[in-house]
Amino acid sequence: MMKKKFVLSEQAISVLNSPKGKNKLMDFFDIKDRRTVENYLSNNVPQSIFMNIHIADLIRELAPYMTNKMIFRRLTDEEIMKMNSDMIEPLIKNGKDDTNTDIH
């Protein structure tokens, strides 16, 4: 079994994508550029800064009805494997380029 990895649920992302949500995120992380927030929200990466434990509190300020199960969801093994292969594939391609050069 793979290590558990969590990401924000679609409901949580929609709350954070609201104008109030984006403003709160910018204040919380002291981010000046709204595009940075939008980029993080569109990627929804498990190890991103938005997987901070305090994000749940921020989301509950905007949507008090949301529980942790509604805010976070666990990635499936298939999603984790795809994410790992997406990260490894460019490294393999770069390694193949290096091995194709002949040194005399």
Image (cartoon, helix red, strand yellow):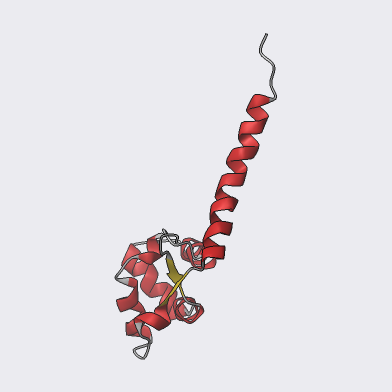
Which quadrant of the figure contains the C terminus?
top right
Q: Is residue 52 above or below residue 58?
A: above
Q: Residue furthest bottom?
A: 65
Residue 26 image offset from top left, x and y in percent: 38, 67
Q: Is residue 44 above or below residue 98?
A: below
At horizontal 41% and vertical 58% (from top left) the residue drawn is 47
Residue 98 image offset from top left, x and y in percent: 63, 27
Q: Answer with the quarter of the image where residue 21 lies.
A: bottom left
At horizontal 61% and vertical 39% (from top left) the residue drawn is 92
Q: Answer with the quarter of the image where residue 82 lies.
A: bottom right
Viewer-side residue, 66 vs 88: 88
Q: Is residue 73 above or below residue 1?
A: below
Viewer-side residue, 79 vs 22: 79
Residue 45 image offset from top left, x and y in percent: 48, 61
On screen, residue 2 versus residue 79, left or right, reads left
Residue 53 image offset from top left, x and y in percent: 30, 69
Q: Residue furthest front?
A: 1
On screen, residue 55 versus residue 40, left or right, reads left
| Count of marks placed on residues | 0
Q: Answer with the quarter of the image where residue 1 lies.
A: bottom left
Q: Residue furthest top?
A: 104
